[in-house]
Image: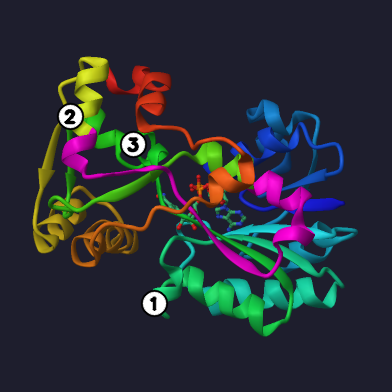
Amino acid sequence: MKVLITGATGNVGLALLRALVDQPSIEVVAGVRDVDKDKAQFDELKHLECRHFDFGREATFDAALHGIDLVFLLRPPPIADIPRFFAPLIQKIKHSGITKVVLLSVQGAERSNIIPHRKIEKLILAHELEYIFLRPSYFMENLTTTLLPEIKALRTITLPSRNAQFNWVSVQDIGAIAANLMVHFETHKNQALVISGNENLSFDEVVQRLNRLTGARIRYKSVNPLRYYYLKRREGQPRDKVMVMLVLHFLPVLQGPPKISDRFQTIMQRKPILLEQFIADNQRHFLR
Ligand SMILES: NC(=O)c1ccc[n+]([C@@H]2O[C@H](COP(=O)([O-])OP(=O)(O)OC[C@H]3O[C@@H](n4cnc5c(N)ncnc54)[C@H](OP(=O)(O)O)[C@@H]3O)[C@@H](O)[C@H]2O)c1
């Protein structure tokens, strides 16, 4: 089976490419925005077929989808306008005769019609494609990506999250299970699967763990949503990004602890990675 991986240079995309290396039944095509640059930059892409693919440029869709059996779709964080970016793509997938889609969605997508991931899920359903919606919880890797600049500059994590519990899952595990689901697509198709880790922890607890394990001296600062908005805007962050971060980190205050799902363990026959393991593997990021 030939699969097109969108977002191949991102966190989940790279984890998925690494996991697919061991899957002889899958022929991988990476959809990237800059074939030459991305190939040179990432070892994982060097020996892969890379095709030019840009969600914002319909002209790239035909060649990228040619001969493909299954598309792994994700919503790049900067893309919020789903009808504009995803409706033409899903239509093109359907008209190309491709029947299978694995979508990286998010835990709780079903609870809101305004979450962009839910809008994409609905488009896929409306086009009667066979699908697997992967709905992961909160990525451990946020600590080494989105939240890292503040950790490095100020030794703090500032969020509007009070003592809310987040469920922590590793992107490595998301890549591994996405690869497995592609291989066994027929078994799992037409389902939405919540993929969580085994731990619900507040940011306070995470920072305590982080400091204990690495000797780093990082502080968690909870601020109210309005203050968070103004702080981040004053730092020069774009409005849309601040709003997404705000909603993502404040909603759990209102919603209560996330559900822990056993899907990962049942499908992968192993436990998901623990936060302690992630911190140990990534401690270089947290030290000065
Ligand atoms: N963070 C969390 O806790 C969490 C939890 C659950 C679900 N999610 C969901 O996971 C998704 C993000 O995954 P990620 O962390 O792997 O993202 P990421 O690391 O930010 O990667 C985004 C990828 O999308 C590509 N991309 C951006 N704009 C593009 C465009 N116009 N055309 C084609 N490709 C484009 C990027 O390519 P370039 O290299 O060209 O920029 C990159 O490969 C989001 O939908 C998010 O909501 C996140």
Marks 3, 2: nearer the viewer = 2
Left or right of 276? Residue 6 is right
Q: Assign a secondary structure to mark 1.
A: loop
The one nearer the camera, 80 or 121, is 121
Q: List x then y, in percent, for residue 115.
A: 42, 72
Q: Which mark is residue 268?
A: none
**Distance of label 2 from label 1 (alpha carbons):** 32 Å
Query: What residue is drawn where x is 90% and y is 59%?
Result: 67
Q: Is residue 23 magenta?
A: no
The one nearer the camera, 159 or 61, is 159
Q: List x then y, in percent, for residue 72.
A: 68, 56
Marks 1, 3: nearer the viewer = 1
Q: Within 10 Å of the Cα at label 3, are there few (<14), some (14-19), or many (20+) other Cα atoms?
A: some
- Residue that numbered label 1 is attached to: 112
- Which is nearer the N-term, disc 3 or disc 2? 3
Q: Within 10 Å of the Cα at label 2, are there few (<14), some (14-19), or many (20+) other Cα atoms?
A: some
Which amino acid lies under the numbered mark 3 shown in the image of this protein? Leu
Query: What residue is drawn where x is 35% and y is 48%?
Result: 167
Quadrant holding the C terminus: top left
Which amino acid lies under the numbered mark 1 shown in the image of this protein? Ser
Which amino acid lies under the numbered mark 2 shown in the image of this protein? Gln
With respect to residue 35, does 85 lie above or below? below
Query: What residue is drawn where x is 20% and y is 32%?
Result: 207
- Residue that numbered label 2 is attached to: 208
Q: Tell me, yes or no, if residue 157 can be seen here.
A: no
Q: Are marks 2 and 1 in contact (CB under 8 Å)?
A: no
**Distance of label 1 from label 3 (alpha carbons):** 26 Å
Left or right of 222? Residue 147 is right
Q: Are marks 3 and 2 in contact (CB under 8 Å)?
A: no
Q: List x then y, in percent, for residue 107.
A: 43, 61
Range shown magenta: 178-206
- Residue that numbered label 3 is attached to: 143
